[in-house]
Image (cartoon, rainbow, N blue to C red):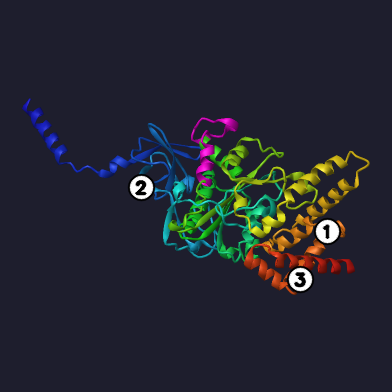
Amino acid sequence: MSVIQDLLKKVESQIESAQLDDNLAWKWEISQIQDWVIIVEWLHDVRFSELVEFENGMKWLVMDISMDQVGILPLGNYAKLKEWMIVKSTGQILSVWVGEEFLGRVVNGIGDPIDGKWEIKAKEIYPVERIATSVIERKPVHQSLSTGIKSIDSMVPIGKWQRELIIGDRQTGKTTVAIDTILNQKGKNVKCVYVAIGQKESKIRVISELLKEQGAMEYTTIVNASINTPSVNQYLAPYVGAALAEYYMFNNQDALVVYDDLSKHAVAYREIALLLRRPPGREAYPGDVFYCHSRLLERSAKLEEKYGGGSSTALPIIETQSNDVSAYIPTNVISITDGQIFLEADLFNSGIRPAINVWLSVSRVGGSAQLKAMKKVAGKLRLELATFRELAAFAQFASDLDESTQNKIEKGKRLVEMLKQWVSTPLPFYKQVVVIYAGLNDHFKTLEVKDVLSFEKVAFWKMDSSFKWLTDELIEKEDINDKIEDGIKKLIEETLVEISGK
């Protein structure tokens, strides 16, 4: 009996004097690897969106936390992991480097450079997930963010920090509208972030080369999570883009971020949710896919002056199937954003570029930011085009039309021709104002439809030469007074004489 008592005393003394490893509380082993998901049981004190580290030094992302296990998704090479490998929490929430050092660069979905250039040595780190700016710190939309596209700046104006959705079927020019908007920010001190989600590598190379040729990469960062990358990278990419844009906003600058596109982002998130065995909902999307997009787009804001006055504007893109805007993801994002630019396949195929549907396109708050000059000349444009669409549809079945109806149809044809625009040729607002003024005030009625764009070229050439004073006045005033209006009329008259003489 005494031998047993002596043994117990030795064990108790050894337990009391034992040095316990504090790391035991936050280390565990991989219990299961399946379908790109690592399952670890009883990994305590870990948080959602936290990085965990494996014994080989790789860091992966916590995407699912339940009562007794944690779901982890890869940010690196999946093949190097094995069951029973040690994993530990790091306490680090996923963050990315941010700063102006990223301008002109192409990075992947987690912010690492992939353009083969030098290492990016930024000075600040922002969390990928951030709570949106509070209402108290925000300022209403009041500053214009010009796209350089006549039909948008005149009828669907966008203001700084607005979230304007670009929606339509595939290959209807959605990306072109976004890229032209980026090109139009040249010289306007607006930093741009283009986020490509689930796109082809060839498409991103074309966009990158175009931005370089136009001198736009100097103020642009491309976040590329192509279709070849894991779903988790495609899921994280827009949040990384939002963090890069927030850096400029919080440093008293203006930013524009394009999400191309959130349809593919929703698909990537659905794949992640299904791999994590989350219950599927409508169209197999997880129940929180709405929150997934709302918390992203709510991060766009315009700060009050006492908080710096910076802004972040968002142009999310959604792809529809056969113009079905009532589908699950389109309706979700429409309800989050401040308006939409709807691009119609039929208009695109008929040669109208950009193919903007006047009826379904709207900007709910952009009118407050529209320049006074544009607001004065373009006020009736939407109504004129809508009337033309109705009359043109009716005229297909009518053999005899009265003179008034014929005149409205002829004017509508010239307005449609006027709003056509070449790809990658954004126009400054003062040139848009002149041509829209001419169209709405019946100055095109003596021209053939095919001559409308010729009129535009001659008028723009004159604004850069003999009517340079008019250009300077419009830039300075951003409004139309009697002197400017007389100058516009004179410019139109001289241009019409020159066109008719050819």
Dot 2: few (<14), some (14–19), or many (≥20) neighbours within 10 Å? some
**Residue corresponding to mark 1:** 444
Proximity of marks 2 and 1: CB atoms separated by less than 8 Å:
no
In this picture, which residue range is highlighted in magenta?
A: 274-297
Dot 3: few (<14), some (14–19), or many (≥20) neighbours within 10 Å? some
Is 284 included in the stretch rendered in magenta? yes
Give the label, 2 or 1, closer to the camera. Answer: 1
- Comes first in the chain, label 1 or label 3: 1
**Secondary structure of residue under mark 3:** helix
**Residue corresponding to mark 3:** 462
The residue at the far left in this view is 2
The circle on residue 90 is: 2
| The one of 18 and 472 positioned closer to us in this rendering | 472
The residue under label 3 is which amino acid type?
A: Lys
**Secondary structure of residue under mark 2:** strand
Is residue 221 among the parts visible in the rendering?
Answer: no
Q: Residue at x 74, y 47 (%)?
A: 383
Q: Residue at x 64, y 45 (%)?
A: 340
Dot 1: few (<14), some (14–19), or many (≥20) neighbours within 10 Å? many
